[in-house]
Image: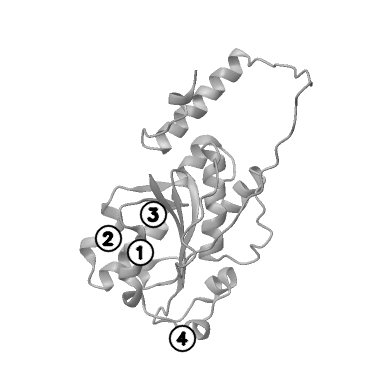
């Protein structure tokens, strides 16, 4: 199963009032493993950036003047997300902006809102943590994810953070699979696995209570829902 975690930055809050996308960031996962492949670009929005928006992401109209137009990168972007489930925090915002850009680029037939393959992690977080703050920063704090580099919002950084949040919310990541080092949009990471020798140690076995089992099953229900019925967790239970 291929998934793409996606985020955008924009000139303002409302595409219906003429605001445009200035940055796209995507992170690829296959079978819930980060591959190391990313898609990232800055865009010339062909309009001024609102002052309030600039305070959020730090990008000015001058910074973006020499960047490509959306129509120039539309095909490469669509190729990257083609056939995937998109994972987006507050999806209506990003999908609304992206679909508007696609329409402006005469690609209305390929708008993302019609695919039905978008998972909104804000809705998922509200289901798991009702009545709590579920912004990306709040979720990073709740799940112990380091977001200290997030002085300003950035589409790729936020996608990387959201990837960790999504995996933490839905059961974790088994391993990291490295992408193609020759891909211009790729980033790679590695892990060191340390094996601990527990031979000769008597480990206490703690059995779950009935309440803990019910809570566990409720979490599995959420994972099954977020994975569109493709979760393997229950299939691996004894």
For marks 2 and 3, the one nearer the N-term is 3
The reply to whether callout 1 and callout 2 are in contact (CB within 8 Å) is yes
For marks 3 and 4, the one nearer the N-term is 4
Q: Which residue is mark 2?
A: 111
Q: How many marks?
A: 4
Q: CA distance from mark 1 to mark 4?
A: 20 Å
For marks 1 and 2, the one nearer the N-term is 1
Q: CA distance from mark 1 to mark 2?
A: 8 Å
Which residue is located at x 56 percent, y 49 percent?
Answer: 164
As helix, strand or loop, the secondary structure at mark 1 comes to helix
Q: Is residue 62 above or below residue 93?
A: below
**Which class describes the residues within 10 Å of circle 4: few (<14), some (14-19), or many (20+)?**
some
Tell me the mark number nearer the camera, choosing from 2 and 3: 2
The numbered mark at residue 92 is 3
Which residue is located at x 62 percent, y 49 percent?
Answer: 140
Tell me if 55 is positioned left or right of 109 in this view: right
Horizontal and vertical percent position of residue 184: 46, 70
The reply to whether callout 2 and callout 3 are in contact (CB within 8 Å) is no
As helix, strand or loop, the secondary structure at mark 3 comes to helix
Horizontal and vertical percent position of residue 74: 32, 70
Front residue of 120/85: it is 85
Q: CA distance from mark 2 to mark 4?
A: 26 Å
Q: Is residue 48 above or below residue 102?
A: below
Q: CA distance from mark 2 to mark 3?
A: 13 Å
As helix, strand or loop, the secondary structure at mark 4 comes to loop
The numbered mark at residue 98 is 1
Q: CA distance from mark 3 to mark 4?
A: 27 Å
Q: CA distance from mark 1 to mark 3?
A: 10 Å
**Which class describes the residues within 10 Å of circle 2: few (<14), some (14-19), or many (20+)?**
some
The numbered mark at residue 65 is 4
């Amino acid at each position: 199963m291929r998934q793409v975690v996606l985020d955008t930055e924009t000139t303002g809050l409302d595409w219906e009032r003429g605001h445009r996308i200035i940055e796209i960031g995507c992170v690829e996962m296959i079978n819930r493993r980060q591959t190391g492949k990313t898609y990232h670009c800055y865009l010339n929005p062909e309009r001024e950036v609102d002052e309030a928006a600039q305070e959020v992401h730090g990008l000015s109209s001058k910074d973006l003047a020499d960047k490509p137009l959306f129509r120039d990168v539309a095909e490469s972007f669509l190729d990257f997300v083609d056939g995937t489930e998109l994972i987006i925090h507050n999806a209506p915002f990003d999908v609304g902006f992206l679909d508007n850009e696609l329409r402006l680029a005469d690609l209305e037939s390929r708008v993302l809102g019609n695919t039905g393959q978008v998972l909104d992690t804000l809705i998922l977080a509200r289901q798991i943590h009702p009545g709590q703050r579920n912004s990306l920063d709040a979720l990073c704090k709740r799940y112990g994810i380091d977001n200290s580099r997030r002085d300003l919002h950035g589409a790729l950084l936020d996608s990387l953070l959201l990837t960790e949040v999504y995996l933490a919310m839905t059961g974790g990541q088994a391993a990291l699979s490295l992408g193609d080092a020759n891909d211009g949009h790729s980033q790679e990471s590695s892990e060191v696995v340390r094996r601990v020798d527990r031979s000769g140690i008597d480990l206490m076995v703690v059995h779950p209570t009935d309440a803990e089992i019910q809570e566990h099953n409720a979490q599995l229900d959420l994972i099954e829902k977020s994975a569109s019925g493709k979760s393997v967790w229950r299939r691996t239970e004894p």
